[in-house]
Amino acid sequence: MAPTLLACNPCLGPQPTTSQLYSPNQTTLVMKEKVFSITGEDFTVRTVDGHDVCHCKGKVVSAHDSKKFTDTNGADLFTLKNKMFALNRSFHGETGRAHHDFEVKGHWKMIGSRSTVTFKNASDGTDVELEVKGDWMDKSADITFAGREVAKISRSFFNVRQLMGDSQSNKREFNRHAQERCSNDRLHTLDRRGGAQSLQAVQLTDPEQYQVTVAPNVDLSLIAAICVSLDEQQEEAKK
């Protein structure tokens, strides 16, 4: 079961507050590890209930190993750039507007992993530092601000009951549609005829899929970028 995280007030993140990037409710993102190093494909960051948050251009868009994030309308949010000469691999989120930029900086740690994320908070202009600690190889980490958890990354396999309830008819419909329409490890919304409820077909057995629980009023695109940065750091460490 996902942890219950307290809402941030004011909103927490470098991006201006919009309903697409910030939610007043706790949100769970579905992420896939190694999406760049293995496939190089573009991908969409989605919530567990199927709402698109942002898109990421997975292919390298420059010689400097940059990855571009856009909103769902295709407007640029930021470009995540590898800081080539950093002692510990770090990333800089560049928006073209310096006061909305951010940095994810890796720190050496004998056991587990640790990173810090720094930015100027868009909602009140204060300087913010987040701390990310955990075991990234196991996709388990906590993101905290001033000692308070604002996001939790965990290797968690979604089950039918969590997503759809306990009815047997829903389970049968899920299994049938999942076989027909689930491909390339993507989420698909299955709209049930005659009802307003939407069912999410999620591939349940993918060992490279993990979830991120995010507190209310936290920049979801920032959390997605942190995950991408940590994944890239881990892949680099294996080389």
Image: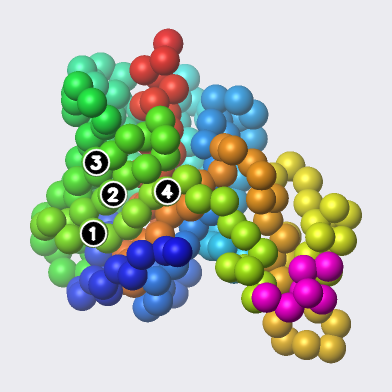
10 Å crowding of disc 2: few (<14), some (14-19), many (20+): some
What is the three-letter code of the residue carrying label 4?
Ser
Mark linked to residue 133? 3
Q: Is residue 72 visible?
A: no
Task: Tell me which label, 1 or 2, sits earlier in the chain.
Answer: 2
Q: Quadrant of residue 91?
A: top left
Q: In which quarter of the image is the C terminus?
A: top left
Task: Tell me which label, 3 or 1, sits earlier in the chain.
Answer: 3
The magenta stretch spans which residues? Answer: 166-172
User: Which of pointers 4 and 1 indicates the residue nearer the eye?
Assistant: 4
Q: Are marks 3 and 1 in contact (CB under 8 Å)?
A: no
Provide the secondary structure element on which disc 2 rests. Answer: strand
Q: Is residue 207 visible?
A: yes
Task: Tell me which label, 2 or 3, sits earlier in the chain.
Answer: 3
Q: Horizontal and vertical percent for residue 39?
A: 64, 29
Q: Quadrant of the N terminus?
A: bottom left
Q: Is the magenta stretch mostly helix, strand or loop?
A: helix
